[in-house]
Image (spheres, rainbow, N blue to C red):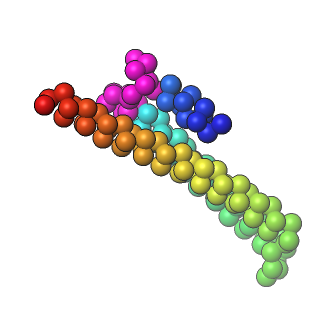
Amino acid sequence: MVILKLKLFFSKYDLDGDRCLNEIEQKNMFKDLSEQNDELKEAYMALEQASEEKGNEEKKRKRTNGVLFEDYSNLSSRIDKMETSIGSIVNKVDSVLNKLENAEKNIRAQSVIFIQ
């Protein structure tokens, strides 16, 4: 399943179909990954801000020292989901970077063989 996802991911950027990402294809991939990372950061910041605003409204309304269990549970669940998503994305990016490093090493090794 993961291999299929990776193949689909790489096929999006492997424009010439040689199963190896050249410099332009790598730049396109990194650009898209950076944009996705920026979008995640913005969504995270918006979530934090909404959480803070909700918390401030709740404090004004209730005027209590504690946090409602329902609010805590909802926020905890949302944070867990977000951490899982971010962890998954980080793992995928790490995997892609490792594969790119290996591909680059293979290309260098092949070019050394051809030069000799």
The residue under the point 73% across, 57% down is 78
Q: Position of residue 114 (x, y in %)?
A: 19, 27
Vertical side of 97 occupied by 14: above or below: above
Q: Is residue 15 above or below residue 1?
A: above
Along the line of sight, the residue nearer the viewer: 1 or 46: 1
Across and down, in percent, residue 103 comes to 36, 37
Residue 45 found in image quarter: bottom right
Locate residue 28, reporting x and y percent: 40, 30
Q: Can residue 67 be seen in this view?
A: yes
Closest to the observer, 18 or 64: 18
Snapshot quadrant of residue 106: top left
- Residue 14 on the magenta span: yes
Residue at the image point whose x is 25% and y is 32% from the top: 110
Q: For residue 46, say whether it is visible.
A: no
Q: Please report the residue visible at 19 percent of the width from the left and 34 percent of the height from the top.
A: 112
Asked whether 37 falls inside the magenta stretch, the response is: no
| Residue 44, x across and y down, in percent | 60, 53
Position of the C terminus, as image quadrant, is top left
Image quarter hosting the N terminus? top right
Q: In which quarter of the image is residue 65?
A: bottom right
User: Please, which residue is most extreme toward the top here?
Assistant: 16
Q: Give the range drawn in magenta.
A: 13-28
Instruction: Spot the residue most to the left.
Output: 116
**Which residue occupies 14% across, 29% down?**
115
Looking at the image, residue 90 sits to the left or right of residue 109; the answer is right
Q: In the drawing, does residue 77 fall left or right of residue 112?
A: right
